[in-house]
Image: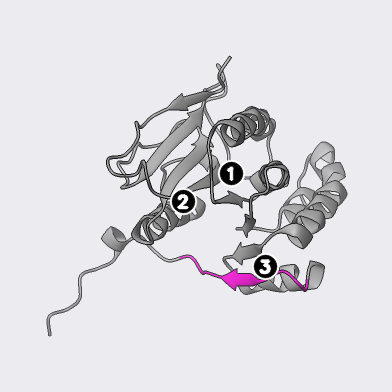
Amino acid sequence: MSVQRRDQSEPSGAGDLPRVLLVSPQPFFRLAGTPMNVRLMCQALADSGYAIDLFTFPHGQRLDLPQVRQMRVWPIPGLSKIPIGFSGTKIAYDVLMIFMVAWALVRQRYVAVHAIEEAAFFTLPLAWLRGLPGIIDLDSDLEHQLASHPSPVARRLAPPARLIRRLVLKRAQAAVTVASHLTALVRRESPQTPVFELRDIPLPEMLSPPDPR
């Protein structure tokens, strides 16, 4: 049984382009930092001549993005609200996404894989089994989030999260961060991994027009 729902058919003219798998474990699109970054990343990849398979959680606004084929995991009945940060709901959708990513890597030929936050923990190892380069995208310090969470279950997950992050960082072709403290984290845990800091920027339509004077 498929765990994914396709919201967009093959974009016109994208069939023969090199294809990148971009995995974002959030609803898309909504006005929040990571989804806005994902939208801009899709635009940059498309402008550079790539087609993009964007895998996300369900819900959110549907966007028509050039050369982007968006696929969402099927919504789980009763779990329509996906909060930011650690939650049982997020874990449930992460599990569905593991199967979604594994199936896509078997069926589709990609040139690279880019995974955001905890999605890198399962997406990049699966990509390496297929001989593909992988990029880990850190938008936050997941270990710190878990360690400071009120739930004792979340706090117990902090040490394993740090271990898995270190292992993934050491084998990643590159890391992308959004802040200096995350860049420092990458350099501390995996000095040999190239790291690129791309700070959050607003969407073009949210900027004020220039003053003609």
In three-dimensional space, the C-alpha distance between marks 3 and 1, rounded to whole angstroms, equals 18 Å
Task: Give me the residue at 82% from left, 49% from top.
Answer: 158
Please state if 183 lies on the left or on the right of 12 as rendered: right
Q: Which residue is mark 1?
A: 84
Q: Which residues are magenta?
A: 191-200
Look at discs 2 and 3 and give the one toward the viewer.
3
Query: Residue 193 magenta-drawn?
Result: yes
Q: Which residue is mark 2?
A: 32
Q: Which residue is mark 3?
A: 182
Q: Please say if the residues under marks 3 and 1 sit with CB atoms less than 8 Å apart.
A: no
Residue 196 quadrant: bottom right
Amino acid under label 2? Ala
Q: Please say if the residues under marks 2 and 1 sit with CB atoms less than 8 Å apart.
A: yes
Residue 175 quadrant: bottom right
Q: Nearer the viewer, residue 35 or 207?
A: 35
Label 3 sits on a secondary structure element that is: helix
Q: Mark 1 Cα within 10 Å, few/some/many (few <14, many 20+)?
A: few
